[in-house]
Image (cartoon, helix red, strand yellow):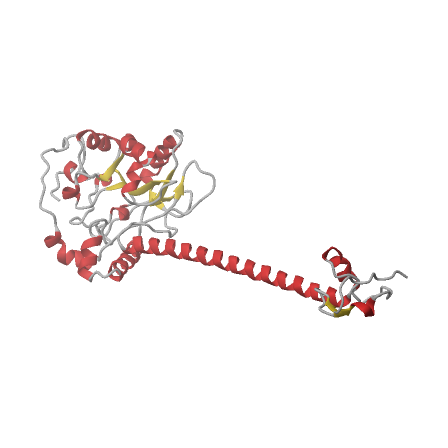
């Protein structure tokens, strides 16, 4: 047995770990045993803890308390990160909703969406504002823009005005009730176009793909039922932002028409956007895909239906993504003479 050395001071001493009283004269010469402190100095702290169960229990409690504090701190940091993420997501959602309610034309529904030169299928953004056909019929005259008569005419001996490819559909020219069109479904299965323009459309987009461009046909033929659904949704969206029905009507008529007055019902029109920018807004014309289409579409029989400088004639705001098939000869003539379809046919819009 080893002996514990005599302490240098008299009186009571206390263990700094277990707080037990240790009387010097009572400890002098006593053998070591479990449960009793052997020294008071700091270098033997670990040895005291090891030999004294009471010290060891207190040290374990201190360790547990530290672990609990660390766990609480981790949970607080995690909760803060989750809160920041939630705030960011809420802000992004709010911005998208605000854009939709304030006229930014963006839709995420799966309507149309033909992809070229890109593996797989993705959902294209689509946006179209529409108006009620009955209201349009009642208010068409008072909302019509001042008549603009073109000073140019297409040679009458070169083009047949009764050609079905040259059918005129706008605010003042309703699609005939008995109109029928043969449709071909696009590869995506989400949209269709008139069979007569299908091959030309495929050729145009494939040639653009050879130059490293990627296109999305986000809208083609629309049935009257589908047109009515879009109409109802967009009118409600405008009214939700504080507009009256008449104000919402005036706003949406700046873009597209109700059932019976939309070119999409002919099957000869397609909205084509860039894969990496699928919003139907002023940014579309800045994409390489749209620039290429505006410069080359006429070679395949397509025209930019609603040019920026012809809004008084078409009565539709500029749409850089909306292309109409009219046939190669007519498209070439209109492109060279810078004519709209209204001007080409000698119509007064």
Give coordinates of residue 134: x percent, y percent.
19, 59
Q: Quadrant of residue 142?
A: bottom left
| Left or right for 161, reference 16 | left
| Left or right for 231, reference 205 | left
| Left or right for 329, reference 111 | left
Give coordinates of residue 111: x percent, y percent.
37, 50
Determine whether 234 is above or below 303 in the image.
below
Tell which of 276 and 17 is nearer to you: 17
Name the residue at the right extreme. 1
Q: Is residue 197 visible?
A: yes
Q: Is residue 183 visible?
A: no
Determine whether 31 is above or below 328 in the image.
below
Placement of the N terminus among the 4 image quadrants: bottom right
Q: Residue at x 39, y 57 (%)?
A: 90
Q: Residue at x 12, y 33 (%)?
A: 153
Give coordinates of residue 322: x percent, y percent.
27, 42
User: How many numbered discs sit on the rendered protein?
Assistant: 0
| Left or right for 49, reference 112 | right
Q: Residue at x 25, y 46 (%)?
A: 263
Tell which of 253 and 178 is nearer to you: 253
Give coordinates of residue 214: x percent, y percent.
39, 36
Tell which of 232 and 345 is nearer to you: 232
Placement of the C terminus among the 4 image quadrants: top left
Q: Quadrant of residue 140?
A: bottom left
Q: Residue at x 75, y 68 (%)?
A: 54
């Amino acid at each position: 047995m080893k002996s514990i050395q005599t302490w240098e001071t008299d009186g009571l001493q206390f263990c700094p770990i277990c707080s037990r009283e240790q009387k010097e004269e009572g400890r002098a010469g006593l053998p070591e045993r479990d449960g009793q402190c052997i020294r008071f100095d700091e270098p033997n702290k670990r040895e005291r803890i090891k030999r004294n169960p009471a010290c060891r229990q207190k040290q374990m409690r201190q360790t547990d308390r530290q672990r609990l504090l660390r766990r609480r701190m981790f949970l607080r940091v995690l909760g803060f990160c989750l809160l920041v993420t939630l705030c960011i997501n809420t802000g992004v959602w709010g911005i998208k909703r605000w854009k939709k309610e304030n006229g930014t034309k963006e839709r995420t529904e799966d309507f149309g969406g033909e992809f070229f030169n890109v593996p797989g299928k993705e959902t294209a953004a689509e946006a179209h504002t529409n108006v009620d056909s009955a209201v349009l019929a009642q208010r068409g005259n008072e909302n019509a823009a001042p008549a603009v008569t073109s000073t140019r005419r297409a040679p009458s001996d070169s083009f047949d005005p009764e050609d079905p490819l040259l059918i005129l559909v706008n605010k003042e020219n309703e699609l005939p009730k008995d109109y029928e069109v043969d449709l071909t479904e696009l590869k995506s299965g989400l949209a269709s176009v008139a069979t007569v323009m299908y091959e030309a459309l495929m050729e145009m987009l494939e040639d653009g793909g050879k130059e490293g461009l990627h296109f999305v046909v986000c809208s083609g033929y629309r049935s009257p039922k589908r047109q009515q659904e879009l109409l109802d949704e967009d009118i409600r969206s405008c009214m939700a932002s504080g507009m009256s029905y008449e104000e919402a009507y005036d706003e949406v008529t700046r873009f597209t028409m109700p059932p019976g007055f939309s070119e999409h019902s002919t099957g000869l029109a397609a909205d084509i956007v860039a894969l990496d920018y699928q919003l139907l807004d002023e940014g579309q014309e800045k994409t390489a895909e749209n620039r290429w289409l505006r410069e080359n579409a006429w070679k395949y029989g397509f025209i930019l239906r609603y040019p920026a400088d012809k809004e008084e004639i078409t009565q539709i705001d500029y749409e850089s993504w909306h292309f109409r098939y009219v046939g190669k000869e007519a498209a070439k003539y209109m492109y060279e003479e810078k004519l709209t379809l209204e001007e080409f046919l000698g119509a007064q819009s």
